[in-house]
Amino acid sequence: MKLPTGLSRQIMLSMTAVVLGSVLLVILGSYAFYALFLAYWPSTISTVEDMSPSAPEWAWMILTTLSALTLAATVAVKLSQRILLPLTSVAESLRKIAKGELSARAISVDASLGEAALLVDDFNLMAERLQRLAQEQVFWNAAIAHELRTPVTILRGRLQGLAEGVFEPSQAQFWSLLGQIEGLARLIEDLRILSLADSQHLELQLSEVDLSADIAGVVHLLEAGLHAAGLQVHTEIKANVMRCDPVRIRQALLALLENARRYASPGTLRIQTRIEQECCVVSVEDEGPGISADMAERVFDAFQRGEHGHSRERGGSGLGLAVVRAIAHAHGGSASCRPGDKAGSLFELRWPV
């Protein structure tokens, strides 16, 4: 037999107290009543021949019944107040949240109530998450609007200048406009991936592949930009067959290399792939300037940029590393950042074999 816990235990103890109190009241009270009346007023007590209760006995039975009912009502009122307090608090908080007051919280109760206390804790946790999601939604809307405003403003100004004859049409002008459009396209694609990941709809096309050619292709694509930033790429790619979505892994590696191109100090940029502890690992390590422990915990959050004041001027939407984490999670893995061996940062993408 399973022992009752929490609220059921409180109800059982209260009902036991009522029954025990009533029984003790009847038994001990009867002994006291008959002892008193037999000692001083024996004639008022009914005899064996006359089984009908006498007037004092009727009065005693009525008094005992009323006392037992009072005891039961008192215990019931106390118990109902303890039970209804958290339920009423949750109901009132729900009405406030329905009206848009997301800071409303239910009143905490005694943990001995078990299920009722757990209900309050779960409700408050849900309310906190709902408020945090609302705040994050406001932040996302503002951040997306900010990221879209810059390229749209540039495009509008350039196109208006071309239409009014302020700028002479040239190949350089058109390439510049195309660059802004490509930046918008990357931002839209990053937002699409993050939205799919948040809704658990980021689909993967898994296959057994050797990532050597894919990584070499990504490095070749960004080689000129990396060299211009003073980065010399060094690859340590082991010929291991990994089960993954190669398109998504290329996309994650592209984001990691773009991040290094913008923020890493000139030096060697080391790219590694390996199988380690039943996990597939792709890592990118630079030689500086490094990331603080506090920033390393938040670097994969959306719209987070480096700690340096000129980080925004180096470009990027602040979504690249968030996309890396989304792709890692879609593979059932994780993305991490920690100090490297040469005063730089080591970004690692890891998923189970």
Image (spheres, rainbow, N blue to C red):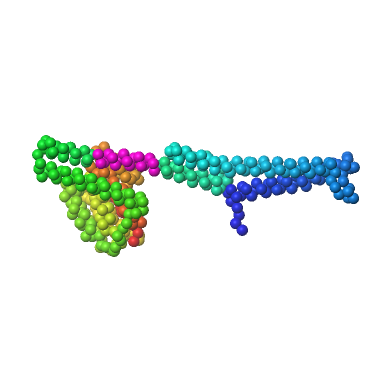
Looking at the figure, which quarter contains the C terminus?
A: bottom left
Q: Give me the residue at 29% from left, 47% from top.
A: 191
- Report the side of 250 relative to 352 (left or right): left
Vertical comparison of 199 with 212: above or below = above
The answer to whether residue 260 is left or right of residue 133 is left
- Which residue sits at x=39%, y=43%? 133
Q: Is residue 135 magenta?
A: yes
Q: Main secondary structure of the magenta part?
A: helix
| Total numbered labels | 0
Q: Nearer the viewer, residue 286 or 124?
A: 124
Q: Quadrant of residue 298?
A: top left
Residue at 31% x, 39% y: name it. 142
Q: Is residue 316 visible?
A: yes
Q: Residue 104 in magenta?
A: no
From the viewer's perspective, is 25 left or right of 231? right
* Image coordinates for residue 283, horizontal then vertical, percent: 28, 54
Residue 335 visible, this angle = no
Please report the residue visible at 70 percent of the width from the left and 41 percent of the height from the top. Answer: 70
66, 180: nearer the viewer:
66
Range of magenta residues: 133-149
- Percent across and percent down for residue 178 are 17, 46
Name the foreground residue: 329 vs 34: 34
Quick check: 167 left or right of 237? left
* Residue 202 in picture, x, y percent from top left: 32, 54
What is the quadrant of the N terminus in the image? bottom right
